[in-house]
Image (spheres, coloured by chain):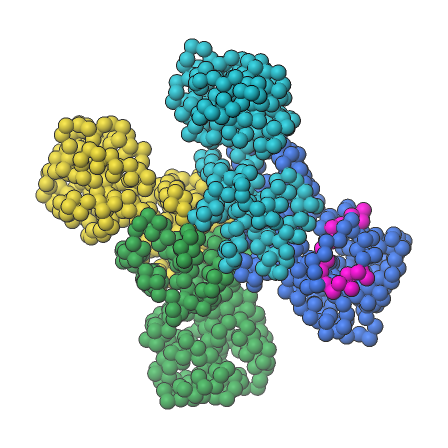
Chain colours: A yellow, B green, C cyan, D blue
């Protein structure tokens, strides 16, 4: 397929390359052009503008956040240009509200819109092993399947309403941050009782909590390794903000999410915003007078 | 070895049988004698009193809670009887405070005391695959190793202070309840956005959260299957109470544990105390006006 | 003075009339014109557009929320019209962020801007007894003083930065909702122990908590009187949202405010959004299985 | 009346003297005898043992906590001595559970028991102006009335079940700590926006929150005056613990109380346990990286 790919950040880059590797023609665009140029040797074609990327059989967006997506897709008028893509695969982690707006705008413009946020970190993306949550018109998802298969190990369908995929993605990220907070409190609790936190986390994340999220963040907490960030604490805070906003709009009280919000704010106030999400554990340590 | 086993509840029974299966002589005692008699055919010897069980090479206790252990071990004066066990393997989930008291009492009585609470449910105990957290005098743990090996897949040592093993066990149970609350809020969040909660939980517990705790409780929540209880909600509430009490004594603020406490109280007030811990998810549903 | 007054809601109306009563010429505008016409008999002059009201010695805005103020002042281009007021007294309860934007926009337009939100309910406004929090250029506040004196019992100055007055107002409203939640939980706690909640609240709000906020909301909770709303629950929820947003932007963790947020969402989900803020107490009652 | 008074702490002393001033014969006992001797010059009679004080027309207890009351009244066997008081006025702040135990024990012993905890600080007690919450047998309260009138400005009756008075007292102390936390968060919020916290608290505690609790603690927070303690932070923590325990037993979820608990633990961990309850505000400040 002929695919335009917009957004070559830490996730977008390996995803675009996975598409190229699978034999698709991939035209790439990025706000700062160097990121696109740097990929030329790897079999993708840099294009000069978002508009040039947003056409062909499909356009894929993997932009940083709501603001970036609004700026490129909504405010740029890109949906009104004469040449438009056969479908738009929106893979960014964005708000439920923006996903709804996008669904309506695309419907008006006649461009099929599929929300397809992903679970997995850059190395998983590089291996083409992401888990992809997809929601949107059935026919559009079917047409996008070769692309989804190139980027992901599995596609998880969630029906025709694109915003649902974003709700699922946010719910998952909420659960990730919850797991980190739980490990942070457990580690502080253990240490206050003379227990070696690394040993405690090794036990738990090696047995009843032997899942990628726990192993990853538990290992970082055990090692006190908060830099460089894999998934940044400030990004986690942004996602919890999106969860709480969507929850409030849908009248869902989420007291655990509120605790996460407070902890993330405290972490940022204490200078950990640029570190890995695992640094949330530093808040629990400091509450008991450590650190 | 010649082992006395006290407490034949849902966990104690398969653990005692695992010891017998491994070739140990196992004398069993239970508050209600029928539970002991019922096991006679399976190769263990019922004895008439706790005192008769509390002797031999080792005594193992797997009693319900602090009150049961205090009643049998502390108040009964069993530690002062002439014949005493070579070591006491305390495997119940009890408070850090009681573990400290027991350590001191045993030291005075000259009976080596090893705290060895376990992770795993009855079916895991039946297979002899528990994860056992052990803390106490090194020599005593070494002597107990054949027993630990018969009951568990692995022993995780946490040093000479018995109370540390209990702190680890409580930290683990805290993380379990936290995971259930996170799934409950995520499910309510998803449903409020039109997402099928079962599909959401299947995705998450099959990928980045693919660990026993998530699969077990996530499956129950997805199926709305809250009875019969595997791990009862009231027991979870008790454990969170122990976590918070130990945390307060050690000056560890645990806001996530507090949220769990509030949710568990609410669940009990709404009649779910006798259901499985997974029923905590019903509170999130009811908060948004469902159920 | 010649004053334009924009916004004749439950608070704006008595405030405009207080100005007229003090001898000022008051031109009034309201989105729905009937509200303005209805006041003609009381000595104020309805004008046809916001632009006609936004001129003279001073313009006072008392609009519903951020959206209303943005629509009338920012998006309408009213600050760029040739005839502009000698100063703008912004008395609405709005976000800190919008207050900052307004301060910048007015500075650019050369119109002195004073933020002057108020404490007090409609009957207090009718008596000209509001407590007014004022922040802005010192000279502008001085010129506005006759207007502030007509509407309020006292003006509380908070320096030259308008947004500070809004932060103070939001902090106060946060404390109000906190007091209501505290009374709701105390009432539920009392009732669960067989205590008559009305008697409990009468005691406490008549002695160590003998302040207007407690008497007002405590009386409503004691009487189970949630309608008609004095200060609506949905408005309280909006204010807590503004508090949390400003707190997050300024990196202030506010766990008590988070609890309020969760309770207000739960109240709304259970159908109490249009009732008085006192209805927040119904959530505490329902949590224990009542109501 | 002939009154025995047990417990001459910061509250007990002025209360005993108020009784003497009103013309009653007051025999006083205190664990450390010097406190009793020191009052001899003020018209009360020190006695040598709790048993000697616990007789006469009435005995009043104003002991530190559950442990002290249990030790003196329950474990000492004082209720079984031949000479017993005409009634027992229990004025300490104790748990609901102990109040229930005491009611049962007194009923068995045939000594009328009235729970009568108080609101008011030492200076209020010295002026005989306490607010007294009284619950117990109607006839006993009637007989105690002259004593209650000597110590208090007003008696608030709560029926025949003594434990209800304790529930009311705990509810009130919960509301006090909640008010302190609210002011602490509001102050941190204000300061993060450049607002002078003292001015903010002066405004709010002088107007819509003009009640003794707010003026007292708000003044301390505004002045950063945390020592000497009026009402100690560790005592506040104890009371919140009693509130949460009683709430849990009665199946009342109290999320605001949980937030207070977490904050108080954090305050103690950071070394503020011996300061005034107002020092809870230091936690909010530290969370944003200050202090």
User: Residue B274 appears at what percent x and percent y?
Assistant: 45, 68
Q: Specify whether residue D99 is in view.
A: yes
Relative to the observer, which residue lies in front, C235 or D63?
Answer: C235
Residue D165 relative to residue A69: left or right? right
Instruction: Give the extent of the magenta segment.
Output: D126-144
Residue B89 relative to residue A168: left or right? right
User: Residue C261 appears at what percent x and percent y?
Assistant: 47, 44
Rendered image quadrant of residue D63: bottom right
Rendered image quadrant of residue A84: top left
State which quarter of the image contains the N terminus of chain D: bottom right
User: Residue A157 appears at what percent x and percent y?
Assistant: 22, 51
Relative to the observer, which residue lies in front, B241 or A30?
Answer: B241
Relative to the observer, which residue lies in front, A166 or C37?
Answer: C37
> Residue at point 43% right, 48% down?
C269
> Residue at point 44% right, 25% down?
C31
Rendered image quadrant of residue D280: top right
| D133 in magenta | yes
């Amino acid at each position: 397929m002929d695919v335009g790919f917009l957004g070559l950040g830490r996730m977008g880059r390996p995803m675009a390359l996975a598409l190229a590797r699978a034999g698709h023609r991939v035209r790439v665009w990025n706000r700062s052009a160097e990121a696109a140029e740097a990929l030329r040797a790897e079999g993708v074609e840099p294009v000069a503008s978002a508009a040039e990327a947003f056409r062909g059989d499909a356009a894929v967006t993997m932009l940083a956040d709501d603001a970036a997506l609004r700026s490129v897709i909504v405010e740029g008028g890109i949906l009104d240009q004469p040449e438009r893509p056969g479908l738009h695969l929106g893979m960014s982690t964005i708000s439920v509200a923006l996903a709804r707006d996008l669904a309506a705008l695309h419907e008006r413009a006649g461009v099929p819109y599929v929300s397809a946020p992903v679970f997995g970190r850059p190395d998983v993306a590089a291996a083409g092993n992401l888990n992809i949550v997809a929601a949107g018109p059935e026919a559009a998802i079917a047409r996008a399947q070769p692309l989804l298969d190139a980027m992901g190990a599995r596609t998880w369908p969630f029906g025709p309403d694109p915003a649902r995929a974003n709700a699922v993605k946010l719910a998952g990220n909420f659960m990730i941050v919850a797991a980190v907070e739980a490990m942070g409190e457990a580690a502080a609790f253990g240490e206050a009782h003379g227990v070696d936190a690394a040993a405690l986390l090794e036990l738990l994340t090696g047995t009843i909590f032997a899942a990628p999220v726990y192993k990853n963040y538990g290992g970082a907490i055990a090692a006190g390794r908060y830099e460089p960030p894999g998934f940044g604490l400030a990004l986690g805070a942004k996602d919890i903000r999106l969860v709480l906003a969507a929850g409030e709009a849908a009248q869902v009280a989420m007291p655990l999410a509120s605790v996460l919000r407070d902890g993330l704010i405290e972490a940022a106030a204490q200078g950990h915003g640029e570190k890995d999400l695992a640094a949330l554990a530093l808040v629990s340590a400091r509450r008991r007078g450590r650190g």
